[in-house]
Structures are given as structure tokens and as C-alpha cells.
Amino acid sequence: MVRDVHPSRQFVGERLLPAFGTGDAAAMSHGEPGLPRLFSVHGRTYEVLGVLEKWKSTGPCRSGADEVYLRKHWYKVLTRPAAVMTIYCDRQARDRKHPKARWWVFTVEEAE
């Protein structure tokens, strides 16, 4: 029997809007995206209190070459209002409606 070990986790799949000037400058100096300290989703503003985990995902070249490219930077963050969110930065935005949309909320779960 398979159980959901995180019954409070919900898939969101929505873009987030970083607050201007709140990106992590130190990360950007190393070529990583600047995780925003403040962002909004559906008009609600969240503050990142801390990064619980971070990782990267890769994928093959889309033109058929043998190279592997870095696709997403993932972050599991604790926010205020209280939540644990998994968010990511898409290195190559592909949303035609929002071509500059790079940051997305993947999941949200209640903070303990």
C-alpha cells in the first residue's frame, strides 16, 4: 500500500513574481539565479525566511546534440506567511504568454 507521506503538500505550478531588487546578489555573482527574498503569487506576498534545500536539474540538448544543459535551479524554502514551498528558476523560459517568466512555485505545504 502506497501512502502520501506529505498529505499537506499541494501542487501549484504557478509563476511567481519576484519583488524588484530582492534577488540574491551573491548567488548571481557566481552565475546562479538570484533567489528573490520577496515574491508574490496570485497577489499574495511571501518573504523567504530560509533555504531548506537546493538542487539543480539537467536535460539533453533540444537540438539533438550530445550536450547536457542545466535546466532548472530548485529551492525548498520556508516563507512568511508560514509555508514550505518548492520553487524553481527555469533557465530557458518557454511560456509564450510570459516569455520573461523564469520563477515558478512547484509545491506548497504547511509549515510545521
Image: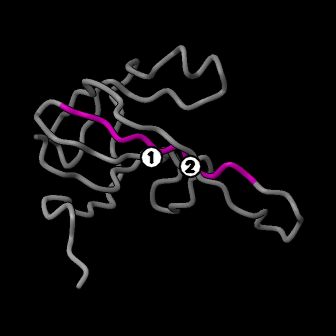
Magenta stretch: includes residue 8: no
> Which residue reaches farthest right?
65
Q: Check disc 1: other Cα within 10 Å, few if <14, some if 14-19, many if 20+.
A: many
Residue 88 x, y percent position in the rendering: 44, 46
Magenta stretch prevailing secondary structure: strand
Residue 18 x, y percent position in the rendering: 36, 33
Check disc 2 and report the residue beneath it: 72
Residue depicted at x 18% and y 34%:
45
Residue depicted at x 44% and y 29%:
35
Magenta stretch: includes residue 72: yes
Picture colour scheme: one colour
Cβ–Cβ under 8 Å for marks 1 and 2: yes
Taking the image as shown, residue 30 lies to the left or right of residue 106, namely right
Check disc 1 and report the residue beneath it: 88
Magenta residues, start to end: 69-79
Taking the image as shown, residue 107 lies to the left or right of residue 96, namely left
Q: Which secondary structure, mark 1?
A: strand
Residue 87 x, y percent position in the rendering: 37, 46
- Identify which amino acid the numbered label 2 is placed on: Lys
Residue depicted at x 55% and y 21%:
27
Q: Which secondary structure, mark 2?
A: strand
